[in-house]
Image (cartoon, rainbow, N blue to C red):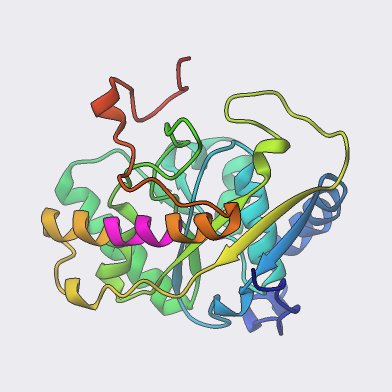
């Protein structure tokens, strides 16, 4: 296993004053008391320009880990967020102030327009966005990545934006999937590894073709699973978990 990455040079995005600074002043020290995040190959996250960061998802707590790691690597951690959250007092202001991207339930045509608009905005401002390809906490019994959804590659292909796979392991000791928060002992170790951009050149121009989107998503999920395999020191399942094949809902709380 490669040693943790040295602290990188901060990007212009992070050094410019923004609403992220006030949030980071609270969240980063607090997270430092809860967990010890070790970042591997962090230099693979672009210092400048647009990108889509695609992590695995197995705990309600892991977005905080990914956000802090992204901030430490010199980039502002922006997520996709449900459009309804932008209408919530205070929270909506915070989401807008930090440049989060609203996602609405919409028809395919409307969704396509929103994807194109979002990708153009990312490219124009040189921003990154964190998208969980699985869409919800994995249903895989051993917490391996399950089948992915196409939103991340749809956005990336629409704007010619690189997709960077990321895997982390250890968050389940802080908050198990749909479990109870465990803060003792403090500073539990979490490892996060950044991968090379997924080569999606074969799908350029296919952002609206369902088959291309599915195949491209499979490549992204394979990249995430490979990184997680390195962290766990064991091979990932040969086939991705398909919730529908096991009678499971793909959204909402996983029933035991």
Q: Quadrant of residue 209?
A: bottom left
Residue 130's spot in the image, x, y percent? Answer: 49, 58
Q: Quadrant of residue 221?
A: bottom left
Image vertical order of residue 121 relative to residue 239, above or below: below
> Is the stretch drawn in magenta largely helix, strand or loop?
helix
Q: How many marks?
A: 0
Confirm whether the magenta stretch covers residue 78.
Answer: no
Closer to the camera in the image, 145 or 66: 145
174 horizontally vs 183: left or right: left
Residue 132's spot in the image, x, y percent? Answer: 44, 50
Image vertical order of residue 54 relative to residue 51, above or below: above
Residue range of the region highlighted in magenta in the rendering: 218-224
Which quadrant would the N terminus be assigned to in this image?
A: bottom right
Residue drawn 38% across and 29% down? 251
Residue drawn 49% across and 50% down? 56
Closer to the camera in the image, 57 or 189: 189
Residue 202's spot in the image, x, y percent? Answer: 18, 75
Q: Which residue, as the protein is rendered here, is positioned at the far front?
A: 234
Q: Which residue, as the protein is rendered here, is positioned at the far top?
A: 256
Confirm whether the magenta stretch covers residue 220.
Answer: yes
Residue drawn 67% across and 51% down? 65
Image vertical order of residue 190 relative to residue 7, above or below: above
Residue 42's spot in the image, x, y percent? Answer: 63, 73
Q: Quadrant of residue 156?
A: bottom left
Residue drawn 60% across and 59% down? 98
């Amino acid at each position: 296993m490669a040693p943790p990455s040295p602290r990188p040079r901060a990007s212009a995005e992070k050094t410019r004053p923004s609403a992220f600074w006030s949030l980071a002043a609270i969240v980063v020290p607090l997270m430092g008391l809860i967990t010890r995040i070790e970042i591997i190959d962090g230099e693979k996250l672009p210092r400048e320009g647009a990108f889509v960061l695609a992590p695995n998802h197995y705990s309600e707590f892991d977005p905080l880990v990914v956000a802090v790691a992204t901030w430490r690597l010199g980039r502002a951690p922006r997520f996709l967020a449900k459009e309804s959250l932008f209408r919530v007092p205070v929270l909506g202001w915070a989401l807008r102030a930090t440049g989060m991207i609203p996602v609405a339930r919409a028809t395919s045509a409307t969704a396509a327009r929103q994807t194109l608009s979002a990708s153009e905005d990312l490219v124009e401002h040189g921003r990154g966005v964190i998208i969980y390809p699985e869409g919800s906490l994995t249903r895989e019994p051993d917490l391996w990545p399950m089948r992915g959804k196409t939103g991340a590659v749809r956005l990336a292909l629409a704007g010619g934006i690189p997709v960077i796979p990321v895997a982390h392991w250890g968050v389940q000791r802080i908050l198990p999937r749909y479990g109870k928060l465990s803060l003792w002992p403090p500073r539990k170790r979490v490892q996060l590894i950044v991968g090379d951009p997924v080569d999606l050149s074969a799908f350029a121009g296919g952002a609206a073709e369902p088959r291309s989107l599915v195949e491209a998503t499979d490549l992204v999920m394979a990249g995430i699973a490979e990184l997680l395999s390195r962290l766990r020191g064991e091979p990932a399942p040969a086939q991705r978990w398909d919730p529908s094949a096991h009678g499971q809902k793909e959204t909402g709380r996983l029933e035991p």
